[in-house]
């Protein structure tokens, strides 16, 4: 069972794959720009379309089972929808290709309009999808825990200030007034603490940018950081770490120890759904 769980944990749903793939495309484009490489957009997108089609075929034919250790490496894609043989619309692959192409074109137009390429070119230091683990990964220490910042793009400008960017493929949510920070806002707030705590950059010199490419034109939200928000975010980090440690210390678990999804429909996208209790599987997965 443990081997099967380890295998299932490496599956990704289509939404995860599509979002991750899009981030890889943008990172490659920005890296090529920084190298001064001439980029022909149509050829660039055609190249990635071929990769999408190759990965899709690999997953559809379950070739990942031929070498489980290579899952997630190169073009070895393993989608949970294919593993569980879910019924998918006939045009699912074409929709993925279309969405990534559209997001890319929206991103490049937005980046040009807001001077992102020029800012990147003039930056003193920059981080494009940096390695999210290891001693040099963006992040900071909270007591005995390393808090990692998986930034999409960060620039340190000539005046020492920081701009941190995070791309979202969805639309900007309408946050209820009673919620202080939604998940994405909390995410970039944690990112803002990285240059402050690692490089001693003043809080008022760090801006975070959430870019929602599900809107046309894209919507940009800009966030400042002050002492009150810093303490609020650090408190949330501390509570999260404490909760994780409590789970690690459990010797005999109980389902009641864990949060349930707010919607049973979300369970359809979970790679371990095959291990759900029989009644849950019948009620929510088999429909």
Image: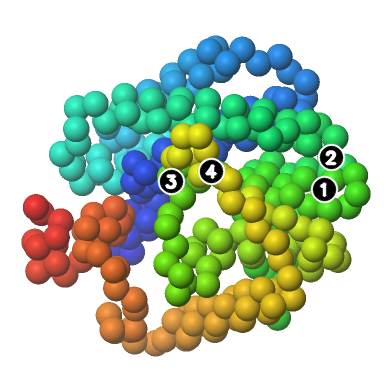
Residue 180 in the image: state x and y as whole percent.
52, 72
Residue under the point 24% across and 26% down: 91
Residue occupying the far front of the picture: 177
Q: Are marks 2 and 1 in contact (CB under 8 Å)?
A: yes
Q: Distance between the residues labelled 2 and 1?
A: 6 Å
In the rendered image of this protein, does residue 43 appear above or below residue 98?
above
Q: Which mark is residue 123?
A: 2
Q: Nearer the viewer, residue 212 or 135?
A: 212
Secondary structure category for the residue under label 1: strand
Q: Can you tell which of label 4 and label 1 is closer to the viewer?
A: 4
Mark closer to the observer (2, 4): 4
Q: Distance between the residues labelled 2 and 4?
A: 24 Å
Taking the spot 27% from the left edge, 80% from the top edge, the residue there is: 255
Residue on which the image places disc 1? 156
Please tell me the numbered disc located at residue 171.
Answer: 3
Vertical order, 239 against 287 (above or below): below
Query: Viewed as shown, does residue 280 lie left or right of 272?
Result: left
Q: Do the residues labelled 4 and 1 touch (CB within 8 Å)?
A: no
Mark 2 or 3, nearer chain start: 2
Question: How much space separates mark 4 and mark 1, taking CA atoms?
Answer: 23 Å
Q: Is mark 2 on a helix, strand or loop?
A: loop
Q: Residue at x 41, y 86 (%)?
A: 250
How many other residues sit within 10 Å of disc 2, few (<14), some (14-19) or many (≥20)? some
Callout 3: 10 Å neighbours few (<14), some, many (20+)?
Answer: some
Q: Residue 219 carries which label?
A: 4
Marks 2 and 1, the one that precedes in the sequence: 2
Q: Depth-wise, is mark 2 or mark 3 nearer the camera?
A: 3
**Where is residue 229 drawn, in percent x and y?**
66, 73
Which element carries disc 3, helix, strand or loop? loop
First in sequence: mark 4 vs mark 1: 1
């Amino acid at each position: 069972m443990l081997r099967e769980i380890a295998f299932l944990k490496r599956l990704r749903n289509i939404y995860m794959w599509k979002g991750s793939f899009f981030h890889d495309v943008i990172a490659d484009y920005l890296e090529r720009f920084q190298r001064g490489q001439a980029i022909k957009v149509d050829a660039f997108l055609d190249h990635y379309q071929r990769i999408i089609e190759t990965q899709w075929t690999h997953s559809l034919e379950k070739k990942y089972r031929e070498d489980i250790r290579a899952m997630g490496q190169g073009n070895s894609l393993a989608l949970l929808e294919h593993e569980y043989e879910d019924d998918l619309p006939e045009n699912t692959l074409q929709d993925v290709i279309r969405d990534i192409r559209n997001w890319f074109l929206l991103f490049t137009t937005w980046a040009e309009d807001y001077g992102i390429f020029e800012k990147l070119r003039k930056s003193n230091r920059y981080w494009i999808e940096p390695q999210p683990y290891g001693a040099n990964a963006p992040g900071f220490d909270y007591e005995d825990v390393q808090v990692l910042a998986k930034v999409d793009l960060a620039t340190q400008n000539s005046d020492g200030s920081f701009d941190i960017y995070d791309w979202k493929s969805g639309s900007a949510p309408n946050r209820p007034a009673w919620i202080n920070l939604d998940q994405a806002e909390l995410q970039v707030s944690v990112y803002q603490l990285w240059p402050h705590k690692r490089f001693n950059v003043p809080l008022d010199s760090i801006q975070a940018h959430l870019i929602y490419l599900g809107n046309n034109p894209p919507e940009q939200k800009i966030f400042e950081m002050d002492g009150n928000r810093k303490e609020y975010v650090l408190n949330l980090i501390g509570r999260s770490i404490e909760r994780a440690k409590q789970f690690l210390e459990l010797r005999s678990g109980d389902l009641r120890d864990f949060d349930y999804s707010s919607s049973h429909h979300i369970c359809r996208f979970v790679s371990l759904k095959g291990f759900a209790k029989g009644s849950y599987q019948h009620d929510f997965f088999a429909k």
